[in-house]
Image (cartoon, rainbow, N blue to C red):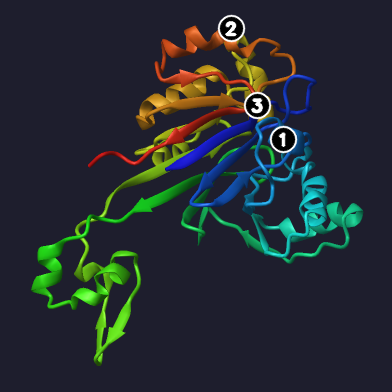
Amino acid sequence: MIDVCLLGTGGMMPLPYRYLTSLLLRYNGSSMMIDCGEGTQMALRRAEFSPNPIDVICFTHYHGDHISGLPGLLLTMGNADRTEPLTLIGPKGLERVVSMLRVVAPELPFPIVFQEFSGDSADFEMKGYKIHAFRVQHNVTCYGYTVSVDRLGKFDVERAKAANVPLKLWNRLQHGETVESDGMVFTPDMVMGEARKGLKVLYATDTRPVPAIIDNGKGTDLMVLEGMYGDDEKLEHVKDHKHMLMSEAAKLAKEADTAELWLTHFSPAEARPKDYEEKIQQIFPATVIPKDGHTTELNFSEE
């Protein structure tokens, strides 16, 4: 299973009742975060999560409301005597931006590993997460992300017997290990059935609607998309600033046929975004307009 928490739902500036957009995912003892705006540490604490298990932070782009919370978070991790490496993933320029932010956090007891990318897409894999970045359309270089967790097939006793796999190796192979024994190499596919459906989450904000969101959203258990304004009369404004209306996000979710949609990155002018929920559900019924700290547990199917 994956635990998903939308730590903050705000855009542009934090408010007393709404921190800036950041998503936390937890799987198999490891946490990862997408974006880290001002107030993210407080949002973590309010949701009763620790920063210590965070192994990777992905950044969509380098506007302040998506990265300005990083120096404080790094200091908190350092003060907790963290020694494990922290991986930061983001568009080209990441190390330069973080180096400037680290003027206030120059000494840390743990290494930072930078993974920069460019182009239309990029892929990374760590701690059981498969991370796919895809280009979206903002007024600076910006990317959305999908995070997937694969699920192995069921152990197939007959398959193992047919391949003459020694019984003593079954457990190790079932857990994904390749084993050499008696001069032969045994691989997990020799004992496992076809892979089953895994879990997949998409996060995209600060963008106009683009086909890449639909393409990458197909088969997702959850899409988290920007819905800066609920009023459709704001269309020209969001077009000019390369943002997205709630109704536009709902149409993308409908076309991608995702299981559920969460909206985020609300304008500070949207004091009561929840008021639009019923209207947006007429476009895509499985829409949630959440408050900070909204959490769900995504579980593998029973198949």
Question: Which residue of the protein is positioned furthest toward the right in this rendering?
Answer: 104
Tell me where residue 253 appears, x and y as whole percent: 42, 27
Q: Amino acid at mark 2?
A: Asp
Quadrant of the drawing holding the C terminus: top left
When asked about the image quadrant of residue 291, the answer is top right
Q: Can you say whether 131 is above or below 199 in the image?
A: below
Query: Which tag, 3 or 2, sits closer to the chain's start?
Result: 3
The CA distance from mark 2 to mark 1 is 27 Å
Q: Nearer the viewer, residue 259 or 247?
A: 259
Q: Residue at x 66, y 35 (%)?
A: 48
On residue 45, the disc is 1
The answer to which image quadrant residue 274 occupies is top right
- Density class for disc 3 (Cα within 10 Å; few <14, some 14-19, many ≥20) is many
What is the three-letter code of the residue carrying label 3?
A: Thr
Left or right: residue 282 compared with residue 17: left
Kind of residue indicated by mark 1:
Arg
Q: Residue at x 44, y 13 (%)?
A: 281
Against 20, residue 98 (above or below) is below
Q: Secondary structure at mark 3?
A: loop
Task: Return the x and y of residue 29 as percentages of the image width and height.
Answer: 53, 52
Number of numbered markers: 3
Q: Residue at x 63, y 62 (%)?
A: 115
